[in-house]
Amino acid sequence: MKDPNQKYTDKKLLVKGIKRMAISIPLLVLTTYILTFAFLNKETIPLYVFLPLGIIFMGITIYLIFNGLKKILSAVFDK
């Protein structure tokens, strides 16, 4: 018999977390490529353009990964 006080997964919050993770994984690959491109062109102008962009996007990527994991965990384990 089912317990009426049993807690279930919040599906809307789980979907939000999965979407954040789905966005962050390709962004992680892209920012790694941008940083590598910037460091390979140390003597030219792209270093000054792509290095700050890569650093900013990497910060956004790390934020999205942790925020997505937090949402997934709270959807599964919270009320």
Image: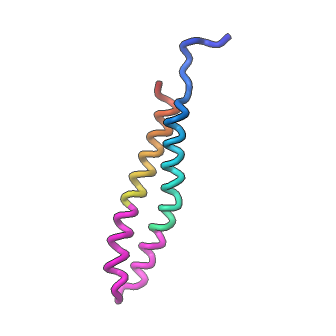
Which residue appears at 49% of the width and 42% of the height? 16
Q: Is residue 36 above or below residue 8?
A: below
Q: Is residue 3 above or below residue 9?
A: above
Percent from the top left, x then y, of residue 51?
35, 74
Which residue appears at 46% of the width and 68% of the height? 32
Q: Horizontally, is 12 left or right of 53 in the view? A: right
Q: Mostly what secondary structure, the magenta segment? A: helix
Which residue appears at 48% of the width and 55% of the height? 24
Residue placed most toward the observer, 60 or 42? 60
Seen from this angle, which residue lies furthest front?
Answer: 12
| Number of numbered discs visible in the structure rendering | 0
Percent from the top left, x then y, of residue 6?
56, 17
Q: What colour scheme does the image use?
A: rainbow
Which residue appears at 48% of the width and 72% of the height? 33
Give the image quarter of residue 59: bottom left
Instruction: Inspect the magenta stretch and tell me whether residue 47 lies in it.
Output: yes
Q: Is residue 30 above or below residue 75?
A: below
Residue placed most toward the observer, 25 or 15? 15
Q: Is residue 40 above or below residue 9?
A: below
Give the image quarter of residue 1: top right
Magenta highlight range: 32-58
Seen from this angle, which residue lies furthest right?
Answer: 1
